[in-house]
Image (cartoon, rainbow, N blue to C red):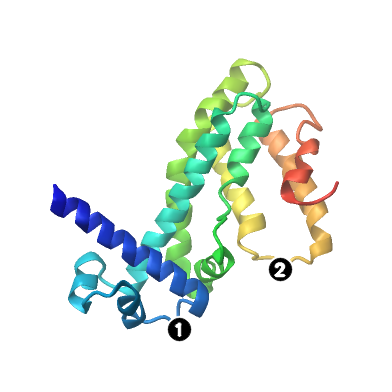
Amino acid sequence: MKTVKEGEVRRREILVAARELFVKKGYEQTSVNDILKIVDIAKGTFYYYFASKEEVLEAIILDIVEEGARRAEMILKDKSIPLVSRIMMAIMAQAPEFEGSDEIKEELHKVENAKLERLYLREMLKRMTPILQEPVLEGVDQAIFQMEYPTECIESILLLGHMMFDCDVFEWKMEDYPRKIQAFLCNVERMLGTKEGQLKELMGMFGQLS
């Protein structure tokens, strides 16, 4: 048992060091040797845990998904927040919050890293859909939401939010965002089958003014 625990600690040390280096130097500029120097391990030890630098980045992405899921779970536990606001805050909590997260996201969204983007989307949907299912079904039971396909509705909202606001695919100007956010919230209202204007008050959560 001690050996297993020590192995988990060593693997975590490698991930922490790699994340820090990817943020500071960039993924392409960071070598396996750079990681070895910080963690102070032999190359063989590194390859015992990870087959490549890309596999390290994949593990970091899975960590980001898990961190977002845990933030969402904490938000959803707070019954003092209205149900609809809780659900939207949980969805928005998927954006990475650690220092330098923009650099990791930039690497993730590069065209040549489409495999990593797919990994993030697959794991994020797999982790977040069950978390959101209970509060969404609660909303259906309370007649707050009207929908036929709750699971698919959650998946669609998660994917739409990610594509519109996390990927920077469209390269919108800053002044475009208030309208895009309003459109997103309007479409989410329709997908959830909730009353018009229900989500308008959530504009401030996006750091924008309506």
Does residue 154 sit above or below 168 in this rendering? above
Q: Nearer the viewer, residue 175 or 82?
A: 82
- Which badge, 2 or 1, comes first in the chain's sequence? 1
Residue 79 in the image, given as x and y percentages of width and height: 60, 24
State the SS at label 1: loop
The label on residue 95 is none
Q: Residue at coordinates 20% horizontally, 56% vertically from top-left?
A: 6
> Quadrant of the rendered structure where residue 127 is?
top left
Residue 147 in the image, given as x and y percentages of width and height: 62, 26
Q: Residue at coordinates 22% horizontally, 78% vertically from top-left?
A: 43
Q: Residue at coordinates 48% horizontally, 34% vertically from top-left?
A: 131
Does residue 51 sit above or below 2 in this rendering? below
Q: Nearer the viewer, residue 199 or 49?
A: 49
> Quadrant of the rendered structure where residue 28 is?
bottom left
Q: Residue at coordinates 73% horizontally, 45% vertically from top-left?
A: 205
- Which residue is tagged 1? 29
* Label pair 2/1, CB-CB below 8 angstroms: no
Looking at the rendered structure, the kind of residue marked 1 is Gln
- Which residue is tagged 2? 171
State the SS at label 2: loop
Residue 55 in the image, given as x and y percentages of width and height: 33, 67
